[in-house]
Image: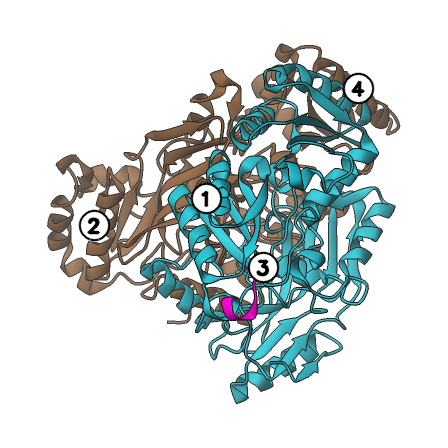
Chain colours: A brown, B cyan
Amino acid sequence: MIRLPEPKADVLAKRDEIIAGLRELVPASGVIAEPLRLRPYETDGLSAYRQPPMAVVLPETTEQLAAVLKLLHRYGARVIPRGAGTSLSGGALPLADAVVVGMMRMNRILEIDFADRLAVVQAGVTNLGITAAMQADGFFYAPDPSSQLACMIGGNVGMNSGGAHCLKYGVTANNLLGLKIVTIEGDILDIGGAHLDAAGYDWLGLLTGSEGQLAMVSEVTVRILRAAEGQRAMLAAFRSNEIAGACVDRIIGSGIIPVALEFMDRPAIHACEAFAHANYPLDAEAMLIIEVEGSVAEQDALLDRIRAICAEFDPISLKVSQSAEESAAIWKGRKGAFGAVGRVSPDYLCMDGTIPTSRLADVLAKIGEMSESYGLKVANIFHAGDGNLHPLIMFDANDPESFHKAEQFGADILTLCVEVGGCLTGEHGVGVEKRDLMHVQFTETELTQQRLVKSAFDPGWLLNPAKVFPLLAA
Amino acid sequence: MTLGSLAPADEAGVATVIAEAADRREPLSIAGFGSKDGMLRPVQSARTLSTRNLTGITLYSPRELILSARAGTPLAEIEAALAEHNQHLIAEPPDLSALLGGPALSSAPQSWGGVVATNLSGPRRVAWGAMRDHVMGIRAVNGRGEVIRSGGRVLKNVTGLDLCKLLTGSHGTLGVLTEITVKVLPAPESTGSLVIRGLDPVRGVAALSAAMGSPYGVSGAAWLPAWAAAEIPALGEGSATVIRMEEFAPSVLYRLGRLTEDLAAFGSAEPLDDAASRAVWHAIRDVTPIRVAAGEAVWLVSTRPSRGPQVLAAAEAAGARGFLDWSGGRVWLAGPGVEGTHAAIAAAVRAQGGTWTLMRAPEPLRAAADVVPPEPAALAAITRRVKGALDPVGILNPGRLYAGL
């Protein structure tokens, strides 16, 4: 189990006073302190770790959020920012002496401007909620993490979330214009705005992906895009991971950047097919889902070129969708992948390293060897265009030994990712999950530099403590 | 004023110079070849630390869409290497040597580090992101003389605080970049443009906005007044509203055709072929229509696209002139390099919302005025603490961005 800092005795001693203070700042239903009602907040998408907080507070306005942080800062109380609680890295894991500040009540879309192609939304609006509000007008918000139905834009900013379509449209950081933030001292600041590229230091870029270490986000101004005329997917199945990887290289090398390029290995194909009945080829070792955009004629032209490239790699099957329904069927298995693996094994860890795409085949081979030696099954799903791997390690949560081995297996995979030139996390964040692996990727000097930047925003280290940075020796 | 120039041979040399300067609390001007010396505020230092000897592309993997080069590598060398594989820099960094009044690029090329440290992006930024969006990894030396890395050489990476973005565009005030890795993309097979003549700026921006809001993937959207259009041969008479498409050749033709129909309400659109389109956007990128006279200053404004015309009008009322890029959101301005014009432009941007940079100005103005908007007190305090976190004794380009910092 991961080490968590000792609760602050002075804060715990003032628990009732702090909760009473919070009740003065937000409507009565917005402060939760009864043990039973704290249970839903004890964990997030990394459910292996659980710790009820001291209290939960749910502000409804930026001003309330500022007042809450000011009060907590005065008491020296630790703060855990929380959106929908979908973090896969334990980014919203509470501490016993901490107050969870949940943003779910700040769920309004404040402005949509098609002429200037932006939307201003509160931090608790869901990712899909943004697109849903403008889809009828042909616009969308591009980053599309798998959790997009539930996850909130504030959390997306905190984690710099990606998704299946970032090969073309970029990640959260590339799709933001501005933030309204609240500092730990309770100051409300506008960062950026309705314009691109603010002069001065790139606070927007630094805050995005900072995992709640620097400030809390209350409003987000996102860039919105007009959707292409249409999109269509194709499926290509191959005899080995190496061959599929070489095919990905050739597609990119041809000058085509598909809007999505997803890779599944044999265990993932089988799990998804059993779950979604998407007609995936069960005799394949590796499968690609490739999506292109444009008019029907443009889609045809691109898919013809991609099909011709795939045909050079001895494919087991090539299926070009002829309609939106067929595209949806191809995506169905991939989009249900987590649920599918969950059927094979109720407990799994979803890893998130990135590797140089040229190392794909040997990394998958090594993961296969590790799977044998740990005796744990793994299914690999990843964003092939950008090398972002999502190995799903299956284990039995009722068996502590199995969980321990799964964590060790995951750490080995991430260490391997760094060794081949990649990184610990491509889009899920460090959280608590990968905190103690930060030494694998960074020198002590580099970690100290990052800690100093954190201290510049949060001198008392009250914001989302015990995440991202390895704990200093007590 | 700069008396001596230090040009270490490698990153370790940069670290040594900075560590020794930090010990002596000696400020350093940070430069590559000096093409951007005239930007922002002047730095008071006896010596300049140049990265010009840190040269060479250290990694280029076309199939992985990734390129790394040392900070002193001339930009042209990187662009040429990419062109060999039909790839390009996504942000389309401009050559502002003429605009900034520095030496010609032949004697002072733009360094890779300089382009990143100033976050210079061209017209394509409106659709495809700024330089900062594509920086995947950096190596840098902080003000303690320590080598720090952030990011890496992969396309997706959220490990730790994103110091890549913090240092990109920090103008050498937080660290000296020694090596930068960027994402690159296949260069488009073909390019083409539409020109609608004679629209006023408000109507022009409305046309640009309609084009950007179309499903056709516009990658450039600019409005030039008649005097600026006249400086670009392919544009000719009258104001020019210009829309660019970069795609496979059949798509460029198809999409320009569809856009011509969709924009019919704004007037007839004349197509520009590949060569003319490239020439026009090259000129817009490098801001060549604005010829800066002695005693003039240059401002770069970023505002909400629909507010660009108001900013331009207010600047014109203060004696400046300019044109609009980024669908109206980017306003390039030149005018009298005096406090009155400067204050009027800053006030206009404040009124419309946005940000500005005093890119170039006569010495008295650039030494005395803010060159970027002042920050609110709470943010300015964070700025000071972050500067202190990276450059505790304040020796890296002190005063370049903010007076006293």
Q: Is residue A312 above or below residue B43?
A: above
- Given contact means CB atoms under 8 Å apart, are the residues at marks 4 and 3 in contact? no
Q: Three-letter amino acid code at disc 1?
A: Ala
Q: Secondary structure at mark 3?
A: strand
Q: Three-letter amino acid code at disc 2?
A: Ala
Pointers 3 and 1 within a single chain: yes
Q: How many marks?
A: 4
The residue at the point 57 percent across, 29 percent down is B204
- 10 Å crowding of disc 3: few (<14), some (14-19), many (20+): some
Give the x, y percent position of residue B254. 75, 18
C-alpha gap between disc 3 and disc 1:
17 Å
The chain under label 1 reads B
Please give the residue where the numbered disc 3 appears in the rendered image: B296
Give the x, y percent position of residue B270. 73, 23
- 10 Å crowding of disc 4: few (<14), some (14-19), many (20+): some
The residue at the point 70 percent across, 49 percent down is B286
Q: Is residue A224 above or below residue A18?
A: above
Residue B363 is inside the magenta segment = yes
Q: Give the number of the disc on residue A465.
A: none
Secondary structure mostly taken by the magenta-highlighted segment of the chain: helix
Q: Is residue B365 above or below residue A283?
A: below
The chain under label 4 reads A
Residue sticking out furthest to the bottom = B24
Please give the residue where the numbered disc 2 appears in the rendered image: A67
N-term-proximal mark, 4 vs 2 = 2
Closer to viewer: mark 4 or mark 1 = 1
Q: Three-letter amino acid code at disc 4?
A: Ala
Please give the residue where the numbered disc 1 appears in the rendered image: B314
